[in-house]
Image: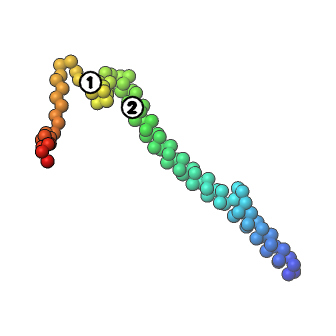
């Protein structure tokens, strides 16, 4: 009887060790779950970026207002009837005697 109990205990320890330490065990499951969580968060951020880009593409296809706004902001272009004023801060001249 004692031999049977020791044999069953050894088998139980062996199976537990395989469950915790072997490839495909719980450690790997936890690692894969962590990767799935990271990839899911990454996909969410990429989906929101794609939605913004898709809206911008649709806006550019539909009308000229988006193209005009983009030309003004990114290229510094002005409309034909507009006058461009650039306002800078006044900087007093540096006194060269010092």
Residue ID for mark 2: 55
At 36% from the left edge and 27% from the top edge, which residue is drawn?
59
Q: Are marks 1 and 2 in contact (CB under 8 Å)?
A: no
- Mark 1 lies on a secondary structure that is loop
Q: Residue at x 82, y 77 (%)?
A: 6
Q: Nearer the viewer, residue 36 or 5?
A: 36
Marks 1 and 2, how far apart at CA: 23 Å
Q: Please, which residue is most extreme toward the top here?
A: 80
Q: Nearer the viewer, mark 1 or mark 2?
A: 1
Give coordinates of residue 78: x percent, y percent: 23, 23
- Residue 2 occupies quadrant: bottom right
The answer to whether residue 97 is left or right of residue 37 is left
Query: In the rendered structure, which disc, 1 or 2, sits on the residue that comes first in sequence?
Result: 2
Image point (43%, 38%), residue name:
49
Query: Observer-nearest residue: 47 or 21?
Result: 21
Residue tagged by mark 1? 77
When the figure is inspected, residue 63 is found, relative to residue 33, above or below; the finding is above
Q: Would you say 69 lies left or right of 3 here?
A: left
Q: Can you give x and y, in whole percent of width and height, for residue 53 in the image?
A: 41, 33
């Amino acid at each position: 009887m004692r031999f049977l109990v020791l044999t069953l205990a050894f088998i139980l320890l062996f199976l537990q060790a395989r469950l915790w330490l072997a490839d495909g065990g719980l450690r790997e499951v936890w690692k894969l779950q962590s990767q799935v969580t990271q990839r899911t968060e990454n996909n969410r951020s990429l989906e929101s970026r794609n939605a913004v880009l898709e809206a911008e593409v649709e806006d550019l296809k539909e009308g000229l207002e988006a193209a005009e706004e983009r030309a003004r902001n990114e290229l510094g272009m002005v409309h034909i009837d507009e006058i461009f004023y650039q306002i800078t801060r006044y900087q007093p001249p540096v006194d060269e005697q010092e």
